[in-house]
């Protein structure tokens, strides 16, 4: 939930800088560096979120099927 909130805040900041830059001609000089910095923070936050999510997915969905566990499941069904 926290990464979604942080990404929402970053998106609002990016849109605010875009609208401020287009609304005021004096602010256009500061627009590009501000967007680059926010874009870098957004990319870093997204990369961290992806790495965390991959770890959680691996905990719940194994990449390879465990043969021993599969045999135990078949034996349990046969014994029922």
Image (cartoon, helix red, strand yellow):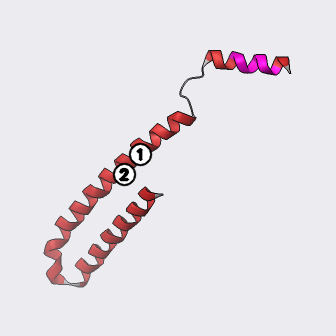
User: Label 2: which residue?
Assistant: 46
Q: CA distance from mark 2 to mark 1?
A: 6 Å
Whether residue 74 appears in magenta in the rendering, the answer is yes
Whether residue 22 appears in magenta in the rendering, the answer is no
How many residues crowd mark 2 within 10 Å: few (<14), some (14–19), many (20+)? some
Find numbered disc 1 in the image and state the secondary structure of the residue it sits on. Answer: helix
Q: What x and y, as percent, mark residue 6?
A: 38, 61
Determine which quarter of the picture holds residue 18: bottom left
How many residues crowd mark 1 within 10 Å: few (<14), some (14–19), many (20+)? few
In the picture, measured across the screen, residue 27 lies left or right of residue 23, that is: left
60 over 32 or under it: above or below: above
Find numbered disc 2 in the image and state the secondary structure of the residue it sits on. Answer: helix
Q: Nearer the viewer, residue 47 or 33?
A: 47
Task: Give the residues in magenta.
Answer: 71-77
Q: Nearer the viewer, residue 67 or 27?
A: 67
Residue drawn at point x = 20 percent, y = 67 percent: 34
Q: Looking at the image, do the residues carrying marks 2 and 1 touch, with CB atoms under 8 Å apart?
A: yes
Residue drawn at point x = 39 percent, y = 42 percent: 51
31 over 74 or under it: above or below: below
In the picture, measured across the screen, residue 73 lies left or right of residue 9, that is: right
Q: Main secondary structure of the magenta part?
A: helix
User: Label 1: which residue?
Assistant: 50
Q: What x and y, as percent, mark residue 56?
A: 49, 40
Determine which quarter of the picture holds residue 70: top right
Residue drawn at point x = 31 percent, y = 75 percent: 16
In the picture, measured across the screen, residue 5 lies left or right of residue 10, that is: right
Instruction: Count how many numbered circles sit on residues in the image.
Output: 2
Residue drawn at point x = 73 percent, y = 21 percent: 73
């Amino acid at each position: 939930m926290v990464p979604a909130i942080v990404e929402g805040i970053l998106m609002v900041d990016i849109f605010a800088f875009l609208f401020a830059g287009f609304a005021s001609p004096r602010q256009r000089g500061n627009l590009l560096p501000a967007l680059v910095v926010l874009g870098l923070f957004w990319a870093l936050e997204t990369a961290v979120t992806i790495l965390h999510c991959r770890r959680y997915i691996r905990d719940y969905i194994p990449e390879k099927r465990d043969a021993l566990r599969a045999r135990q499941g078949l034996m349990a069904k046969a014994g029922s």
